[in-house]
Amino acid sequence: MKLFIYFLFTTLLIANPYPNFTKKDFIYIQKKAGKIAKNRAEDYQKTIFTYKSLPKKKQLAKVNFYLNQLLPQYDDIMQKQEDYWATPKEFLIAGYGDCEDYVIIKYFTLIKLGFDKKKLYLTTVHEKYIGGYHMVLSYFDKEGESPLILDNLSFRILKLNTRTDLEADTFINLRGVYKIDKNNKLKKVQSYSPKFQELLRKVKRER
């Protein structure tokens, strides 16, 4: 079943990069959430399109900066439940979200721009200095090197090994859940993430 979901989702991404909005979508968004939400979705679609011809590093920087401008909000305020993972469309309509929501929309946006989904990971980290857990997006640009970190709390994209404030816990993507070793090698510890699978099902329903 997990393999089928992986295959189906990969096929959908290739056939129709997500998130994508049609004219009907914009009309629906305006009726449901108002003109500001509709304008935000339109701006996202137009802005991301302008990044298509840029080099990969500039795309990373542009996507991180653009999406970080949307304001953070705790899950219990946004969705009335703890640790809710919003789809990119839900996030854009709301205009705010928690750290997981920033990571999710960056993940899908970079795939939309042509990044290899096998190199992108939703990453849970421990914040060493202030305590607690946080989520960032990791991009393994080159094998054996520390991943680049896209963080909604920073406009700078730095390698994980230079982020002395963060200690990586788990790395999640379509292929499973991983831990990282001192040589920047990933070792699978779970075949899949239930929350990530549920997110993919929600994304599929939105298409």
Image (tube, rainbow, N blue to C red):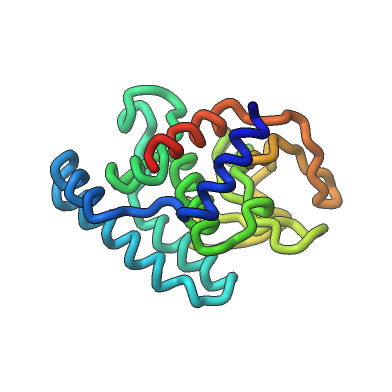
Figure disc tally: 0
Position of the N terminus by quadrant: top right
Residue occupying the point 53% across, 58% down: 110
| Vertical position of residue 158 compared to residue 175: above or below | below
Q: Is residue 89 left or right of residue 201?
A: left
Would residue 128 be visible to someone looking at this image?
Answer: no
Would residue 45 be visible to someone looking at this image?
Answer: yes
Q: What is the quadrant of residue 29 in the picture?
A: top left
The x, y position of residue 18, in whole percent, is: 44, 51
Q: Is residue 114 left or right of residue 99?
A: right
Which of 95/11 is in front? 11
| Vertical position of residue 150 compared to residue 5: above or below | below
Residue occupying the point 28% across, 62% down: 43
| Vertical position of residue 50 compared to residue 105: above or below | below
Which of 76/204 is in front? 204
Residue occupying the point 27% across, 59% down: 42
Position of the C terminus by quadrant: top left
Residue occupying the point 67% across, 59% down: 159
Name the residue at the right extreme: 183
